[in-house]
Image: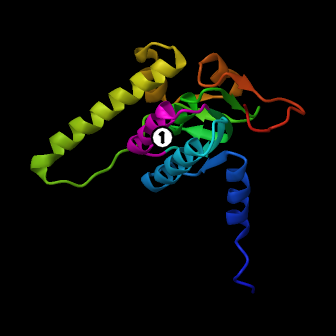
C-alpha cells in the first residue's frame, strides 16, 4: 500500500474546505466542535464569501453545541446550514443558528434534551447538577430565539423527544427551506 497518498476522507475534506464547505457528521462532542469551530474561523479569516456547514449529527453535548453557536454568531461571514440524514439534540441548535438554513427532504430532526452523566464527590454533585440545569435552560432559550417559539413550547418538544420531518422542521422554524428535486446543492451564497 502506498502511504504517501492521502486517505480518501482527507482528500474529500480538503476538497470541500477549498469550496468553503465544512462537514459536521456524527456525535457533536468537544473534539468535533473544536475542529468545526477552527475550520469556521479559518474560512472567515480567509475570505468574505459565505460558508456552508453540512450537518448530519446524532446529537451530543450542550457545551459543544454552544461552542459552535457562539462561533457562528460572531463570524464576519454568513454560515449557511444544510441538514441531511438526522439532526438531533444539541445539534438542532447549531442547525437553527445558521444564516440560511435548509435540509434535504428526508432529513429527520429530533428536539431532545441531551443525556448527562457525571461522576463527582457527593459534596459537588448538587453544584454540577445545578450547572447542567442552567445549561439546559440556556439551550431551550437559544432554540426559542432561533425558532421564534415560546420557551415553554421548546421545553415540551425537548422533554418529549419530538421528531420532525423536514416539512415540520420548516414549520417549527428550525430550517428555512427544503431542497427538492434537481435543486443543485452548491454552497449557498
Which residue carries the number 1 mark? 68
Looking at the rendered image, the quarter that the N terminus falls into is bottom right
Q: How many marks?
A: 1
User: Which residue: 43% across, 25% down?
Assistant: 142
Residue 96 occupies quadrant: top right
Q: Predominant secondary structure in magenta?
A: helix
Closer to the camera in the image, 183 or 87: 183
Closer to the camera in the image, 4 or 63: 4
Give percent across and percent down for residue 61.
42, 45
Give percent across and percent down for residue 185.
80, 38
Q: Is residue 56 above or below residue 154?
A: below
Give percent across and percent down for residue 60.
47, 46
Q: Is residue 142 left or right of residue 39?
A: left
User: Which residue: 66% across, 35% down?
Assistant: 50
Disc 1 on helix, strand or loop? helix
Q: Is residue 94 above or below residue 145?
A: below
Q: Is residue 117 left or right of residue 122?
A: right
What colour scheme governs how the chains and residues are painted in the rendered image of this protein? Answer: rainbow
| Span shown in magenta | 60-78
Residue 113 occupies quadrant: top left
Looking at the rendered image, the quarter that the C terminus falls into is top right
Closer to the camera in the image, 25 or 2: 2
Asked whether residue 76 is drawn in magenta, I would say yes
Q: Is residue 55 above or below residue 76?
A: below
Amino acid at each position: 500500500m502506498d502511504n504517501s497518498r492521502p486517505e480518501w476522507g482527507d482528500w474529500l475534506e480538503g476538497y470541500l474546505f477549498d469550496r468553503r464547505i465544512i462537514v459536521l457528521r456524527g456525535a457533536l462532542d468537544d473534539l468535533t466542535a473544536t475542529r468545526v469551530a477552527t475550520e469556521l474561523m479559518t474560512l472567515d479569516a480567509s475570505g468574505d464569501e459565505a460558508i456552508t456547514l453540512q450537518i448530519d449529527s446524532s446529537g451530543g453535548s450542550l457545551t459543544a453545541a454552544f461552542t459552535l453557536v457562539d462561533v457562528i454568531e460572531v463570524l464576519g461571514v454568513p454560515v449557511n446550514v444544510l441538514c441531511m440524514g438526522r439532526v438531533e439534540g444539541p445539534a438542532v441548535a447549531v442547525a437553527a443558528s445558521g444564516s440560511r438554513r435548509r435540509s434535504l427532504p428526508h432529513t429527520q430532526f429530533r428536539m431532545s434534551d441531551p443525556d448527562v452523566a457525571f461522576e463527582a464527590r457527593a459534596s459537588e454533585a448538587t453544584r454540577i447538577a445545578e450547572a447542567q440545569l442552567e445549561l439546559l435552560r440556556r439551550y431551550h432559550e437559544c432554540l426559542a430565539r432561533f425558532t421564534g417559539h415560546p420557551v415553554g413550547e421548546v421545553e415540551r418538544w425537548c422533554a418529549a423527544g419530538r421528531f420532525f420531518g423536514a416539512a415540520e422542521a420548516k414549520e417549527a422554524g428550525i430550517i428555512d427551506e427544503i431542497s427538492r428535486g434537481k435543486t443543485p446543492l452548491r454552497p449557498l451564497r
